[in-house]
Amino acid sequence: MLYQPSGPPIPLLWAAHTPEEQRHYLDKLEVWVAWLIGHYRLDHRYVPECWAEHWELIEELSALHLAWEGAYATTSHADAPLTWHERLGHARPRLAEWVARTGCRAAEHRGRR
């Protein structure tokens, strides 16, 4: 289930956290990514099933999540959701490029983080 952010989000520097802390943050991100995939009908060309095994996709999706939290926080400007959708539009080609670089296919993972 998603939540209504109540204030400005705090950026997450993945490399500054222990593997255990990263797993905790990744668990939270997985909920949002599942929503994103379903809500915007993103297929494996943008977010493969193994996205959480690729740091480049974790970082990109984490940044999108942060922008989404900022756009939908109760303290946001009225046009912030529109700006988020523009950012999503710019991120889709980057996601596709990152996925292409991984070599992963619909049900085939190649490589680890």
Image: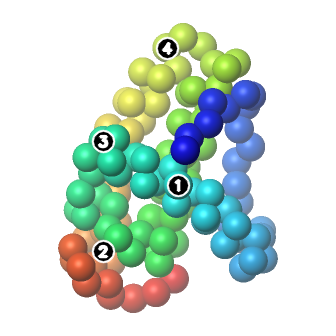
Compared across the picture, whether 16 is left or right of 1 comes to right
SS at badge 3:
helix
Front disc: 3 or 4: 3
Residue 92 in view in this figure: no
Which residue corresponds to the image point at 48% horizontal and 71% vertical from the top-left? 52
Q: Residues within 10 Å of mark 2 (few under 14, many from 20)?
A: few
Instruction: Look at mark 2 in the image and give the residue it sits on.
Output: 101
Q: Are marks 2 and 3 in contact (CB under 8 Å)?
A: no
In percent of width and height, residue 12 lies at 70, 55
| Separation (CA) of disc 4 from disc 2 | 34 Å
Q: Residues within 10 Å of mark 3 (few under 14, many from 20)?
A: few
In the picture as drawn, the residue positioned furthest to the top comes out as: 78
Q: Amino acid at mark 2?
A: Arg
User: Up-down: is 109 above or below 99?
Assistant: below
Q: Amino acid at mark 4?
A: Asp
Q: State the residue in front, 38 or 45.
A: 38
Front disc: 1 or 2: 1
Q: Earlier in the sequence, mark 3 or mark 4?
A: 3
Front disc: 4 or 2: 4
Residue 109 in view in this figure: yes
| Separation (CA) of disc 3 from disc 1 | 14 Å
Q: Earlier in the sequence, mark 4 or mark 2?
A: 4
Q: Earlier in the sequence, mark 1 or mark 2?
A: 1
Q: Amino acid at mark 3?
A: Tyr
Q: Which disc, if any, is residue 40?
A: 3
Front disc: 3 or 1: 1
Q: Which disc, if any, is residue 79?
A: 4
